[in-house]
Amino acid sequence: MVRRSVRGHVATSVLAWLFLAIGPLQAVEFTDVYASIGAGAEGRIDNVGLTIFPTLIIPVGGQFEGMGQAYTAVAGDASFFDANPAASATLEFTELTFVHNNWIADTAIEGLVYTRRISDFGLAVGGKFLHVPFTRYDTTSRQVAGGRYSEGTVGVNASYNFLRSYSFPGIAVGTTLKAAYRHVPQEIAPDQSAVGFAADIGVLSRFDLLKRFSARAPNFAAGVSARNFGPPVEGEPLPSQITAGIAYRPIRPVIIATDFILPVSFAPDVPPPPPGGAVGASVRVTPFFSAQTGVLLRWGGSRVSMGASLTLADLSVDVNYNLDLATQFRNPDRFSVQARLNFGDEGRRALRDLVDQYYLEAWRASAVGNLEVAIEYSQRALELDPTFTPAAQLLEISLATRQLQRDLRAIDLESLGEMTEDEPLF
C-alpha cells in the first residue's frame, strides 16, 4: 500500500485531489476514495480533482494569491505569470522574483520568474517546482520504499501593447508557452512519470472610467485569459480555464477586483468542474506598504486569502496566508513569501519626466507669445515620445498661430504698398 507521510491531519478532500492529479499509483484505489467524497456533495464535485499537473493551477504567491486570485485585470507584478500573459507588456519594472510556498503539510512549492519590458514589448520566463515525500509500506506495515514525488512547470512569455497613446494606455495581447513534468520514483509506482504541454493566451486593457481623482494612471482595467490549454496527458485533462476579470480603483489607494472562472476540459470522458469566481481588494496604507485580501469560490478549492506587501527601493516582499479546508494552525502551511528584485524601468520614468519638462516649457513660451520657442520645445517632446498628444496639439496650435501672424504681416505690408503708390504720405 502507498501512503503519504504527512505531518498532522490533512483534509481528505484536498488529499484526494492531489492524489488524483498524480495519477493511479500502484495498489491504491483512489476511485473508491473519491467516490466516497463526491457522494456527500450530491454529485456537484464528482469531477473536481480529475486534472493532471496541479502546479499549473496552484498559485505560487505574490499579489495574485493575496487577492484571492482575482488578478486577471490587475496583473501589476511578476505574479501575472499565473494570471494573465498579456501583462508583461505593461509592467513598470524589470523584476526577478523568488517565491516559496508552504502549501499542504510537508508539500512545498518553489517559484522563479524574470520579466522585462522594452517599450511596448514584454517578455518573461519562469517556473515552479512542487515536491511531496512519499513512503511505501507492505501489508505488514514494513517500509519497503521511499522517495519524493516532484512536479515542475516552466514557461516562456511574450506580449505586445497595441494602440498605446497619451490618452489610451493600449490593448496588450500576450501568450505563454508551458511545459510540465511529473516524476514518480519507480520504487513507489512504476511508469507514472509524464510530460505535458500547454499555452496561455491573454488580453488586457486599462482606461479611465468613473474616475473621481486626478492621476495619469487609469483607474479601470479589464482582462481575459485562457490558461493551461493543451491536450490531455494519459487520458487526464490539464486544469484548463477561461478567466475574465475587471479591476476598479474608486479612490487612489484602493483596488477592487473580481474574476469569473470557467473551467474547460479537453478530455472527452472528463467533464469540467462548475464555474467559479474570485473577489479581491488591495489597499495602499503608506507609499511603501499595502494589504491584500480575497476570496476564491470554486468547488473543491475555495479559500480566503490575506496578504501584505512591503516595497523598498529595489526590493519588494509579499507575504500571504490562506485559510481553507487544508489549513493547519499547528503547522506553518498555506503560507507563502515572495521577494521581488527591482532592476529599474529601462529609463522610462526619466524619459517621461523630460517629455513633461519640454511640454511645460513650450506652454510657458506660448503663453508669452514666443512661438518659435514653443514650437522648438514641442518638437523636442515629440521626438522623445511621438505618442504624447498634448505636445502634438500644442505644436499644431503654435504652427497655425505663427502662420496666421505671417499672413497678417503680409496683408499689412501689401496695404502699406498700395497707400504709398496712390496717396503720398506728405
Image: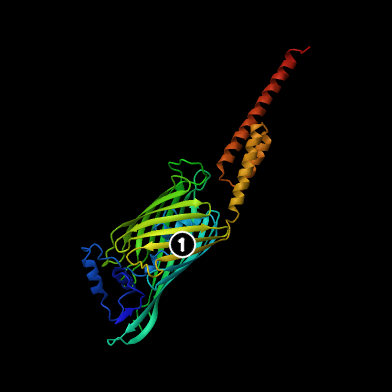
Quarter of the image where the C terminus is located: top right
Identify residue for label 1. 319
x and y, in percent, of residue 105 in the image: 37, 72
Quarter of image, res 358: top right
| Residue name at image x 47 percent, y 53 percent | 172
Kindly identify the amino acid type of the residue bearing the numbered disc 1: Val
x and y, in percent, of residue 237 in the image: 32, 67
- Label 1: which secondary element: strand
Crowding near pointer 1: few (<14 within 10 Å), some, many (20+)?
Answer: many
- Which residue is at the front of the view, 363 or 6? 6
x and y, in percent, of residue 261 in the image: 34, 57
- Image position of 381 with respect to 242: above or below: above
Q: Is residue 174 visible?
A: no
Q: Which residue lies most toward the right here?
A: 426
| Residue name at image x 63 percent, y 43 percent | 357
Q: Is residue 21 left or right of residue 341?
A: left
Colour theme: rainbow
- Image position of 287 with respect to 213: above or below: below
